[in-house]
Amino acid sequence: MGKSHALLAVCALAALAGCQKQAKLDYTSLDQSGMWSSSLGELKGLKPSSLEIAQLTKLKQAGASDDLCLALLKATHAHGHEFSSADSAIDLSRSGYGDAQILEMAQSDQLDILSGEAVTLKLIGLSTSTVEEVLHRRIQGLPTLTSEQIGRLKNTGMSEKQILEIVNQGLSDQQAEALIAQREAVRNHSNTGFVRVRGRKH
């Protein structure tokens, strides 16, 4: 019985060692993407997973700097999960957002949540300062109009300055929808206020 217990213990230890032994990670893709050796050295110290290496390679191939790649990985690890937001970062960059803005979203752990809204705000045609103010409110968790609501207000003829004033009022979603519906009703009514001209019958 003692030998059996000893054998089981040896097998258990061997299995545990096998589980703990990690496969050697391959950094070749990052090296080939143009990441500097010094950056690779720092990256290895952050112990990225194979998924993160693939994500960072995608970022590098899209033109991201080494500094941004490392900063995004650190920001994500600080929140206790893997970095898997390469697509969001790439979309933001292509829409004109700088590294600092992208990193700010990542540091608030909202990169994936905010990226779609941020891209849409640019497409609506808002100025950089207005976009930044809207996003800062979102990052801080303050009540803020969605990009869809802002677009609808813009379609009613409201100026960017007026929209920003509404945003800063911190309306609830229900209040915002009521305001938008009111303006849309006025717009739709004004579009039908024409006079039909009929010819006289002789």
Image (cartoon, grey):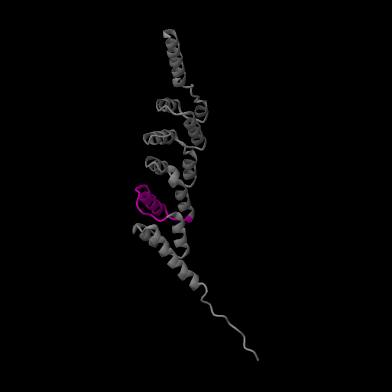
The residue at the point 45 percent across, 53 percent down is 121
Residue 94 % position (x, y): 49, 45
The residue at the point 49 percent across, 53 percent down is 123
Task: Say above or below: 150 vs 7.
Answer: below
Q: Please, which residue is most extreme toward the right here?
A: 202
The residue at the point 49 percent across, 26 percent down is 27
Total numbered labels: 0
Tell me the quarter of the picture where residue 12 sits: top left
Residue 4 % position (x, y): 45, 10
Which residues make up the magenta segment?
Answer: 124-145
Tell me the quarter of the picture where residue 13 sits: top left
**Residue placed most toward the observer, 65 or 181:** 181
Residue 43 % position (x, y): 42, 28
Task: Say above or below: 26 vs 191.
Answer: above
Question: The C terminus appears in which quarter of the rendering?
Answer: bottom right
Q: Is residue 135 magenta?
A: yes
Question: The N terminus appears in which quarter of the rendering?
Answer: top left
**Residue placed most toward the observer, 127 or 102:** 102
Q: Is residue 46 magenta?
A: no
Q: Please, which residue is most extreme toward the top here?
A: 3
Residue 76 placement, left or right of 23: left
Q: Please, which residue is most extreme toward the bottom here?
A: 202
Residue 24 % position (x, y): 48, 21
